[in-house]
Image: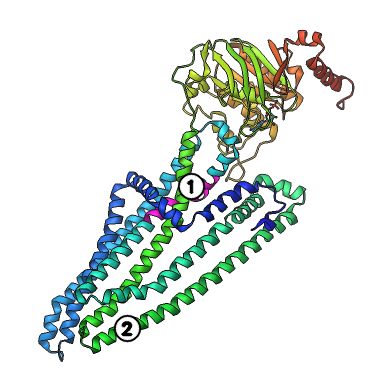
Amino acid sequence: MADDVLDGLELNEQSWWAHDAEVTASGLFTMLRRLPALVRDMLALTWRTSRLDTLVMVGCALISEIFTALGLLATTDVLAQLFSAVPTTESMVAAVPGVAAVVGAAVLRSAFSEAGTWARNRLDPLLTQAVHTRLVELTTAVELAAFDDPDFHDQVERAGMLSYRGPSMLLWAVVQTLSGFIGLLAVSGALGVLHPILLPLILLSAVPSTWASVRSARVGYRATAGIAAAHRRQSVLQDLMTDRRAAAEIRSYTMRPYLLAQFGRIYRWVTAYELRSVRKQQLTGLWGDAFGGLASGVVYAALAALLWTGEVRLAVAATAVLAIQRAGSATSQALYGVNRAYEAGLYYEDFVRFCAEAEARAEVSGGTAPPSDLDRIMVDGVDFSYPGANEPALTGVSIRIEPGEIVALVGENGSGKTTLSKIIAGLYLPTSGDITWGGVDQRAIDRDALRERVAVIAQDFNHWPFTAGQNIAIGRHDSAEPLGPVLAASGADKVVDRLPYGLDTMLDPSYKGGTELSGGQWQRVAVARGLYRDAPLLICDEPTASLDARSEHAIFEGIRRHAVQRTVLMITHRLASVRWATRIYVLENGKIAEEGDHASLMARGGIYAEMFTLQARAYTEGGYPSK
Ligand code: ADP
């Protein structure tokens, strides 16, 4: 329906739309069938979050409705006294206990209702905290491969965006529904006592507002669901236009008019859609009011007839008028509750589904501790495919890494080097094939314990919005080991020396006192981070890609010195840096094409020799400008 708006946008449209289609297809009755299970789930969550507040909220809301009914009954007594004859001092005095009961009931009703609202207001942030915490606990525990699956991404996004509203909204909706029904029951009970005919009359008066409220809520919900995808696009564009990282490119590529036009187009569409539903809701409300007025007229006429024929006394009729009003509000409360429960159910279902999916995708970990000394790592016939990929990233890869060796992976972009290193680091599980650490199957080893033994200097390392010190000590924040040696080995000491607050400088200029580093400076911080982990296996994936020649040399020297007691798996395009590797594996299209040390690979005259000669020629035959 909004395809015209979304045409030409670079974002993944299908996943965004899939949910909305599904949501709008979840009709009221489908949701009502699923609600009991969702409500049970939500109550368990609420109960776990705060028993006292749950009890107070539900209990008080229900008790306050009972006081409404008692108040109505007391009102009849008072009116009976007052309307019995010409008011006298005696009749006024006789009415005092009744008035006291009415006032008492009203005070207690308000007190309980306020206590319920107070508990609800306490529960709200507690539930939001519980949901958000659960979301991050689950997302950080799934297999890394889940993040390459668009379906999972979509679920994370939906759960993150809307789910936090689900539980408290659903709880409140359930309480509203129950309160409404109890209120209606209580009023009905009171009216039954007064005169049985009054009950059907009141139900009749509630029909038009019922219809209007259901229809209006549906229209409102459809409007929300209908614009959800466009809304998300709009906020993505807005985020891009306010994002620090995007700011430079928006300017240098003069993207402003394009982005503003896209933004304006979506906004116009969203607003037009909203205005249409507002009109529909308004019309529904008008019809509801008109028929509601008619129905009330019928009820009052019937009441007048009952009075005329002497079927009811004047006092009862007066109470009935109050009861009609109360019944009307109880009915709309119950209906509003049902509608809200329907809407909240949709959001909450997102959360419940996400939890189930994330639990199913949780990392599996063996219980065996990794060998204490890093022994030989054998990769044997490993295949790996990314979720949804047509081609495998690795096919039948076998390599070995002996303790103390420096092993290099080289090959063209996309040949599978990073993927292989991530599998060895225990980040991805191979689709088939085996990896053993000192003869122990990697699958049997505790994943976190294994990762403690590996330091990865990744190509796409994170620029954490923390201080320089925290950026280096990541994963070892409690360690008392000084940072000095790794700062020197990585060359990060020169970076830190120039920072206004040294290691305490925040490395994000969007924070007060924060600053930004250049690509090469960041890379030194990332190398320092890897070295500080002090793990027996160091994996370096293009550690010097953004560095100038001198810094590159210094870093390789630093890593080499650091690696004396350690094993290193090195991925780099700078073949001059892998000359000193014990063994070099050349990958091509996810397969090992060549293997050997520098001399033997050069002698072989294959891919490696060709790549090396090309690079060497670039330096020696004017490939780069000489100084
Ligand atoms: P290299 O490190 O040699 O440049 P990679 O291991 O990064 O190569 O990539 C190997 C292949 O896997 C490439 O075809 C790449 O497109 C694909 N690939 C890499 N990462 C992902 C991912 N997260 N999801 C899907 N495919 C990926």
The percent position of residue 213, horizontal first and vertical second, equals 44, 68
Which residues fall within the magenta stretch? 157-172
Looking at the rendering, in which quadrant would you find the C terminus?
top right
Q: Residue at x 65, y 17 (%)?
A: 397
Q: Mark 1 belongs to which amino acid?
A: Asp
Per the image, the residue denoted by label 2 is 300
The percent position of residue 48, horizontal first and vertical second, equals 33, 43
Q: Which one is nearer the viewer's eye here, 364 or 557?
A: 364
Q: CA–CA distance between discs 2 and 1?
A: 46 Å
> Left or right: where does residue 411 sit relative to residue 143?
right
Classify mark 2: helix, strand or loop: helix
> Left or right: where does residue 157 sit relative to residue 545?
left
Looking at the rendering, in which quadrant would you find the N terminus?
bottom right
Crowdedness of circle 2 by 10 Å Cα count: few (<14), some, many (20+)?
A: some
Determine the image quadrant of residue 507: top right
Quadrant holding ligand 1?
top right
Determine the image quadrant of residue 66: bottom left
Residue 168: in magenta span: yes
Residue 524: in magenta span: no
Mostly what secondary structure, the magenta segment? helix
Q: Mark on residue 350?
A: 1
Task: List the single residue furthest toward the left.
Answer: 90
Q: Mark 2 belongs to which amino acid?
A: Tyr
